[in-house]
Amino acid sequence: MQPYIPQTLPLEDLDYKRLFGLAVDANAALARYDGLLQSLVNPAVLLSPITTQEAVLSSKIEGTQATLDEVLEHDAGIQMDEQKTQDIQEISNYRKALSIASEELGHRPMSLSLIKSIHAVLLDSVRGKDKTPGAFRIKQNWIGAAGCKQEEATFIPVSPLQLQDALDAWIGYVQSDDIDALLQMAVVHAQFELIHPFLDGNGRIGRLLIPLFLYQKKKLASPMFYLSAYLEANRDEYYAALNAISAKQDWNGWIAFFLKGIAQQADENAAKVKAMQSLYDDMKRIIHEITHSQYSVYLLDAIFNKPIFKTSDCAAQLKAEHGIHEKTTLSLLRQLKEENVLKELQAGSGRRAATLCFSDLINLAEGRTVL
């Protein structure tokens, strides 16, 4: 098997008759989702658990086993075993890389240097830390069964001798405009995965590129569209469609799969956002009815942004941000716990603060009852 040779972009001879209807549906679904995002007063707070869930699912595709609630528990200071802690660190790195890249794209276009910098963040102190984080590979890699030799590989990416040329052509395509931005996104993602420019972390970087590209192309007002739930649910088809590009240049099959995923995930994301907005509105009323406090909205934003937390951390945050006395916050949290709005995951003991959780939000983000 020879190393993959990327096709020239933009692609020619695509079956637009087959793809046009799928592109229309995907664009319409994404536009509905983006319109919903733009209607939110503070999407970063409201959708914080969805962002973390994306990091969980994208990392899960690569083999991590941590769940959303475990990541949030770890964030709150609950101790985990060594393997779980390592998995959570990978997920935390993914969140950080997405945040940094989103911020950078507000100032400059997508570039190879930006991609290398977020790759360095992604592999910081986790699996792959010894595989040149932040640098494109200078040796051949390949994909196959664990421990297989190159001649036993199922796929061999671009030769390191051709890698820079392939990347230059790819980033040029990213910065250009094709006939349709979502069709272009499908090609951008697949070509990146097939070039496989890093020794490790290519899949996660490739999935990070999806919301970042759509944000850059102004298909999203903020880079908060995540496809990993669809890719994880259809993992075998995902890899089969990518393999079909290298094996028989079946770009049409891959693009069709990707566009269907955009449409499906946009609708599912929109439904989840609506449910979270509804929960937020309900809790705004309920918390005020329970506490009769002028600070109830500040408290609600805090528990939405961090639905598992130490009471002392929440009190310190609200004092720093809004000047609310710690004793006031602790009293409000106690009232919410007594009314079962918040659950106690870990009781306070001595100088250790209690750990509380807003289980309704976590269960909604995970799509199942976990707490």
Image (tube, rainbow, N blue to C red):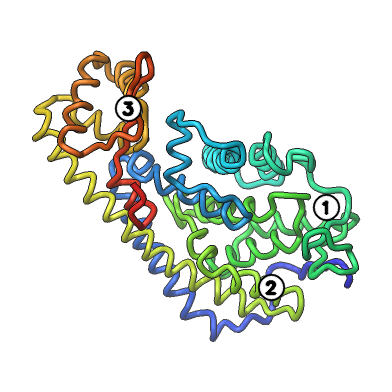
Classify 179 as above or below 227: below
Instruction: Name the one closer to the observer, 161 or 68.
Output: 68
Q: Earlier in the sequence, mark 2 or mark 3?
A: 2
The residue beneath circle 3 is 347
Judged from the image, the secondary structure of the residue bearing numbered disc 1 is: helix
The residue type indicated by label 2 comes to Leu
Tag in front: 1 or 3:
3
Judged from the image, the secondary structure of the residue bearing numbered disc 2 is: loop
Identify the residue at horizontal 87%, vertical 59% (top origin).
159
The answer to which quarter of the image holds residue 207 is bottom right
Assess disc 2: are there few (<14), some (14-19) or many (≥20) residues with their C-alpha within 10 Å of its C-alpha. Answer: few
Instruction: Name the one closer to the observer, 180 or 162.
Output: 162
Q: Earlier in the sequence, mark 2 or mark 1?
A: 2
Identify the residue at horizontal 46%, vertical 33% (top origin).
75
The residue beneath circle 1 is 164
Quarter holding the N terminus is bottom right
Q: In the displayed structure, does residue 266 sit left or right of residue 3?
A: left
Q: Position of residue 11 (x, y in %)?
A: 69, 73
Q: Position of residue 198 (x, y in %)?
A: 76, 50
The answer to which quarter of the image holds residue 330 is top left
Assess disc 3: are there few (<14), some (14-19) or many (≥20) residues with their C-alpha within 10 Å of its C-alpha. Answer: few
Judged from the image, the secondary structure of the residue bearing numbered disc 3 is: loop
Q: Earlier in the sequence, mark 1 or mark 3?
A: 1
- Is residue 107 visible to us here? no
Residue 11 - label: 2
Classify 163 as above or below 310: below
**Tags 2 and 1 in contact by the CB under 8 Å rule?**
no
Q: CA distance from mark 2 to mark 1?
A: 20 Å
Assess disc 1: are there few (<14), some (14-19) or many (≥20) residues with their C-alpha within 10 Å of its C-alpha. Answer: some
Q: CA distance from mark 1 to mark 3?
A: 55 Å
